[in-house]
Image (tube, rainbow, N blue to C red):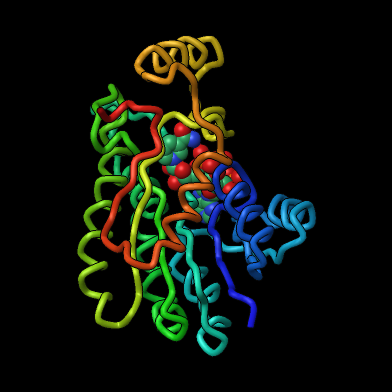
Amino acid sequence: MKKTALITGGNSGIGFATARKLQKKGYQVYIVGRNSEKVQQAASELGVESLVADMGQLADIESLAAPFRNSGLDVLVNNAGIAQPVPIEAYDGDVFDRLFYTNVRGPLFLIKNLLSAVEKRSGSITTVSSIITQRGASGFSLYAATKGAVNAFTKNLAVELAPRGVRVNAVCPGAIETPIFSKMGIPSEQLGAAKEQLLSTIPLRRFGSSEEVANVIVAQLEATYVTGSVWDIDGGVNT
Ligand SMILES: NC(=O)c1ccc[n+]([C@@H]2O[C@H](COP(=O)([O-])OP(=O)(O)OC[C@H]3O[C@@H](n4cnc5c(N)ncnc54)[C@H](OP(=O)(O)O)[C@@H]3O)[C@@H](O)[C@H]2O)c1
């Protein structure tokens, strides 16, 4: 039987590269996106299945998981996420909810809703966190808090779900060249300067690629004695 994989945010960046790698390894891959046109286009480019769900909406998450309850699922990659600089004076309830609903509530409730499916296949779950949990960056306290929550729930769910044969891990990318930077609402000259500054903090002196992150995600998913682990992929930043 073909192994199955579900990847949220699979139409872009790290999720797209992970989908391509799993598809090449022979998995039946389902990519999830919030925009039906974008996710269908990505799926046809990859030759995989597409599903539409907004990870900020609990009803979407429940509908997304339902079809897998009978068939089972080998691999879940909780990759969808948003990043936005929010200086503390700019905090408000809306931006707090948007970041936490997408980056924390979405992945947690998807795990909850897919648990019986993943348990059926003694499967593996990886959530995409960030190296920002371990290194300060001005303006990113709220985003970092969402990813810190990911690291914390990963360690705790790994212990809770180990007796049921389900592994739970996370990866912490550093600076990876993906469309996420252009979605942060930062003017382009300012963004260029910020990326230059970021580059100077990376021992390998370059941004990583989505493919380099996908390689580690797939290795973690297939590492059968690894659970509760948070792996850095950061060009040496966290040394
Ligand atoms: N790139 C980096 O430097 C970096 C570093 C550390 C961690 N990360 C994490 O890596 C993950 C992937 O990001 P990326 O860099 O590959 O960025 P990306 O290219 O922007 O991909 C993010 C994906 O998540 C989707 N998404 C966002 N909000 C969603 C929602 N509410 N429901 C469903 N899908 C949603 C996006 O959809 P749209 O295409 O419609 O926007 C896109 O498919 C994120 O969790 C991010 O926080 C990235």
Q: Give residue 175's quadrant in the image.
A: top left
Q: Residue at x 30, y 63 (%)?
A: 227
Asked if 156 appears above or below 146 in the picture, the reply is below
- Of 199 and 2, nearer the camera is 2
- Of 22 and 153, nearer the camera is 22
Residue 11 image position (x, y, % from top left) = 64, 50
- Of 126 and 59, nearer the camera is 126
Q: Is residue 81 left or right of residue 49?
A: left
Q: Give residue 43's quadrant in the image.
A: bottom right
Q: Is residue 15 left or right of residue 224?
A: right
Q: How many marks?
A: 0
- Of 68 and 62, nearer the camera is 68
Q: Residue at x 40, y 61 (%)?
A: 107
Q: Identify the image quadrant of the N terminus.
A: bottom right
Q: Identify the image quadrant of the C terminus.
A: top left
Q: Give residue 139's quadrant in the image.
A: top left
Q: Residue at x 26, y 67 (%)?
A: 158
Q: Is residue 149 left or right of residue 168?
A: left
- State whether residue 170 appears in this view: yes
- State whether residue 82 appears in this view: no
Q: Is residue 182 left or right of residue 101?
A: right
Asked if 173 appears above or below 102 in the picture, the reply is above
Residue 151 image position (x, y, % from top left) = 26, 51
Q: Residue at x 42, y 20 (%)?
A: 204
Residue 223 image position (x, y, % from top left) = 40, 62
In the image, farthest residue toward the bottom = 70
